[in-house]
Image (cartoon, rainbow, N blue to C red):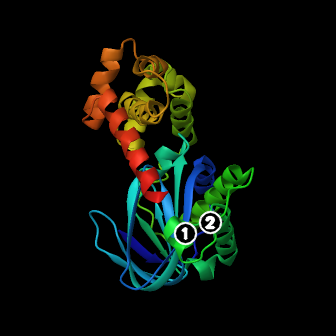
Amino acid sequence: MNVTTLTPHAPPSDALDRALASLEWTLVASYRHQLTSGEPFARRHDGPGFVYVFDGVARLTVQGAPSEDLAAGELVFFPRAHSTSVLATGDVEFIDVGFEAAPLAHAAAETLPAALVVRDFARQEPSMVALIDGMACAWGRDSESARRGGATGHPRAGDAVICSRIATTIVSTALRAWNEAGCAPAGWLRDVTEPRIAAALEALHQEPGRPWTLDDLARVARMSRSAFALRFQEAVGETPIGYLTRVRMETAKGLLRSELTIGAVASGLGYESQAGFSRAFQRHTGSTPGRWRVEARSGAVQRGRASA
């Protein structure tokens, strides 16, 4: 886990501007919690999210990383699916936010660590704290908070759109400060530092079901076939076709949560047969599309009941 006290000092970067422009978040849920000392909390999110501590202290545990103590004014961003696990080491009030990433967000976010702990966030970005507080109020509190007297609240028309835009602003601000402090891993902006490679990546994300060839992508990048293949491998760390397959599989996960048939998902992602798609999906995830769909839907139902 990267833990950093952020002090902006780097000049603005065109690459960062393009990266932040590609990050767009759709709010799924926002819960505000008040825990007493010694009380645990856990929730699983299928996508990115963040935790912000309004008041008090707590200990955050992330799988595969050491626990970290959090205090008021600190924010933790999770770029991918994650489990939020918090133990109140004193009375604490915090917000737990979960959202889905737009397809274009995957490339810029996937090289980030599992959790980014942004120390001193409230002091550096006081205007963001007001936005976070407003987003928490708009989406109400969980049942445990309600039993303690917290307002349950009911979403108003437009809350989903407004809060999603607020979430995008908050995360973009946190990432900017984190990048300016020099804490970002080398390469997380690799897809936007080179406009030609960025153009090919954007095309892949916009049309993952198109029957792309190396020649097609080289034309989008306005490069020769050989030069494009070499530069893409150097910049992204894998071949263009390998990257395309991964984009298709990540897109498939979202589509499998819908009412589309597996055959329709396969066809929409450019596979000539459902069997071919199923083999590719199993290589990528270790599970068949059908089994993955059942488990994903079952998990969503169980989490919905737990937070009801």
Label 2 to label 1: alpha-carbon separation: 38 Å
The disc at residue 180 is 1
Q: Amino acid at mark 2?
A: Thr
Image coordinates of residue 271 in percent, x first then y, are 40, 17
Q: Residue reaching furthest front?
A: 147
Relative horizontal placement of residue 74, taking residue 240 as reference (left or right): right
Q: Nearer the viewer, residue 287 or 2?
A: 287
Tally of marks: 2
The answer to whether any part of residue 187 appears in the image is no
Q: Residue at x 58, y 75 (%)?
A: 9
Image coordinates of residue 98 in percent, x first then y, are 51, 56
Does 88 sit above or below residue 245? below
Q: Amino acid at mark 1?
A: Glu
Q: Nearer the viewer, residue 12 or 228?
A: 12
Q: Residue at x 39, y 49 (%)?
A: 302
Q: Quadrant of residue 284?
A: top left
Relative horizontal placement of residue 29, taking residue 270 as reference (left or right): right
Does 62 sit above or below residue 264? below
Q: Residue at x 34, y 21 (%)?
A: 277
Residue placed under numbered mark 2 in the picture = 152
Number of other residues with Cα within 10 Å of mark 1, as a class: few under 14, some 14 to 19, many 20 or more? some
Image coordinates of residue 34 in percent, x first then y, are 51, 77
